[in-house]
Amino acid sequence: MTPTERRSRATEAFFGRRKGKPLRELQLERMAHLLPEICIDLQAPAPEDLAGLFPSRVERLRLEIGFGGGEHLVHRAGETPSTGFIGVEPFVNSMAKLLAEVETKELRNIRVYDNDATQLLDWLPAASLDQIDLLYPDPWPKRKHWKRRFVSKVNLDRFYRVLKPGGLFCFASDIDTYVNWTLIHCRDHGGFDWTARNRTDWVTPFAGWPGTRYEAKAKREGRSSAYLTFRKI
């Protein structure tokens, strides 16, 4: 087994299944031709300046882990073309959906990675990102599965390493136990300052928030969401 395979096996518990219903012909074409154009190759050395991953000069760099349907990533990329976005999503059907949006909207400031986010985090140069978004991650609601939650001491160490001084980690969830879990882990880590100063700060969506299908589902089912922002100390 290669080192890459060992890393993948050791961390794949952070996400579930990799594929849903069969892709349509046009989706398969995009996966075959567009995905290789914008997918980050971890076999190549990481550039000293990540801005070089993008065809046009970008001023900020932002990572979204588990972009799901891609609504938030596409919205942010269109809203701020001067920011370079890296989206991570191992679920094939979600990646195919994002590629359609990238092609239709001709978004040139998105790069993707289609496997385990921890592999990408370990590849990225230190102090290279302005922001990391972890939005409605899999809550692994059963207590025996909490060890699979992406927020952990080891992954917060990864966040701390790749964020620039003052960089942001933004987390959103409708699951109270995961919100509390994240607050406790960030507090105990010691490298992040929760920016909220009153209750409205963490029940109010992030500025420019477009909403996501996960948030809409939570509202339909009667759950409210929390929006947490942590700053690297």
Image (cartoon, rainbow, N blue to C red):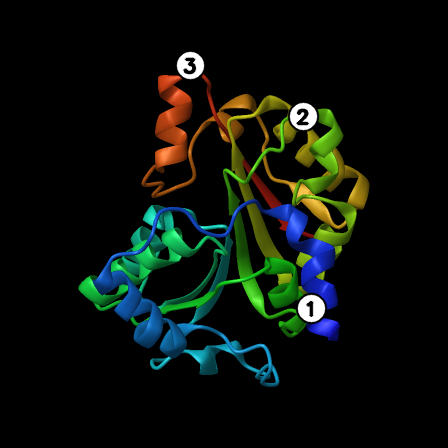
Rendered image quadrant of residue 27: bottom left
Which one is nearer the viewer's eye here, 24 or 59?
A: 24
- Residue labelled with disc 2: 142
Going by the image, does 204 lie left or right of 151?
A: left
Q: Is residue 152 above or below residue 79?
A: above
Q: Is residue 58 visible?
A: no
Q: Indicate the amino acid at tag 1.
A: Glu
Q: Is residue 191 above or below residue 197?
A: below
Going by the image, does 9 lie left or right of 55?
A: right
- Residue labelled with disc 3: 222
Going by the image, does 139 lie left or right of 51?
A: right
Q: Is residue 93 visible?
A: yes
Say whether disc 3 or disc 1 marks the residue closer to the N-terminus. 1
Which one is nearer the viewer's eye here, 50 or 3?
A: 3
Q: Position of residue 198 (x, y in %)?
A: 57, 25
Q: Write the residue at 32% across / 41% down.
A: 210
Say whether disc 3 or disc 2 marks the residue closer to the N-terminus. 2
Please tell me how crowded label 2 is: few (under 14), some (14-19), or many (20+) other residues with Cα within 10 Å: few
**Residue situated furthest top in the rendering:** 222
Q: Position of residue 92 (x, y in %)?
A: 42, 56
Q: Indicate the amino acid at tag 3.
A: Gly
Q: Position of residue 190 (x, y in %)?
A: 79, 46
- Residue labelled with disc 1: 5
Q: Of helix, strand and loop, which one carries label 1?
A: helix
Residues under labels 3 and 1: Cα distance? 41 Å
Q: Position of residue 188 (x, y in %)?
A: 81, 39
Q: Quadrant of the N terminus?
A: bottom right
Residues under labels 3 and 2: Cα distance? 20 Å
Q: Of helix, strand and loop, which one carries label 2?
A: loop
